[in-house]
Amino acid sequence: AEYCNTYSTAGTKAGDWFLPSLEELKLLADNFSGINSLLTVLGKPTIGDEYYWSSSESSDSGAALQELPLDVTHFIKKYVSYHVRPVLAF
């Protein structure tokens, strides 16, 4: 979450980005091909076939992990390293 909160790009600043919830990551899974096609056209990095942390917690020590492009959710311990995908509110 901290990485996403401090992330910035040209035209954005730290605090504009956030760690998506499980439901927001499921929207990415549902629209994976279309989003990556648009990102490619825009010359931006695409979303990889990876596991991504969500901001949705399952307990004090666990959180939801979304497998993209599949709509598969895993609940695991927070100390395990996986990818994050910062997102912007719109």
Image (cartoon, helix red, strand yellow):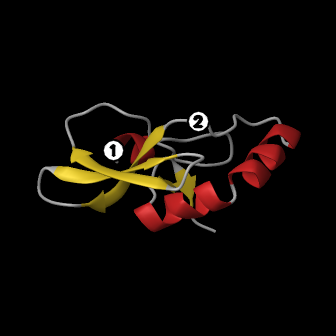
Residue 73 x, y percent position in the rendering: 40, 54
Q: Is residue 21 visible?
A: no
Residue 28 x, y percent position in the rendering: 61, 57
User: In the image, what residue type sits under mark 2?
Assistant: Asp
Residue situated furthest right in the rendering? 41
Horizontal side, residue 34 vs residue 14: left or right = right
Where the C terminus falls, by quadrant?
A: bottom right
At x 34% / y 57%, what residue is drawn? 55
Question: Which residue is more in the foreground, 78 or 2?
Answer: 78
Horizontal side, residue 84 vs residue 34: left or right = left
N-terminal-most mark, 1 or 2: 1
What residue is pinned by disc 2?
49
Q: Which mark is residue 72?
A: none
User: In the image, what residue type sits under mark 1?
Assistant: Glu
* Residue neighbourhood size for the residue with mark 2, other residues' Cα within 10 Å, grouped as few (<14), some (14–19), many (≥20): few
At x 82% / y 35%, what residue is drawn? 43
Picture layout, residue 21 above or below residue 85? below
Picture layout, residue 88 above or below residue 7? below
Residue situated furthest top in the rendering? 81
At x 55% / y 45%, what residue is drawn? 68
Q: Is residue 46 visible?
A: yes
At x 68% / y 47%, what residue is drawn? 11
Residue 22, picture quadrant = bottom left
* Separation of marks 1 and 2 at Cα, in angstroms: 22 Å
Residue 41 x, y percent position in the rendering: 88, 41
Whether tag 1 and tag 2 are in contact, CB under 8 A, the answer is no
Residue 42 x, y percent position in the rendering: 84, 42
Q: Which mark is residue 2?
A: 1
| SS state under label 1 | helix
| SS state under label 2 | loop
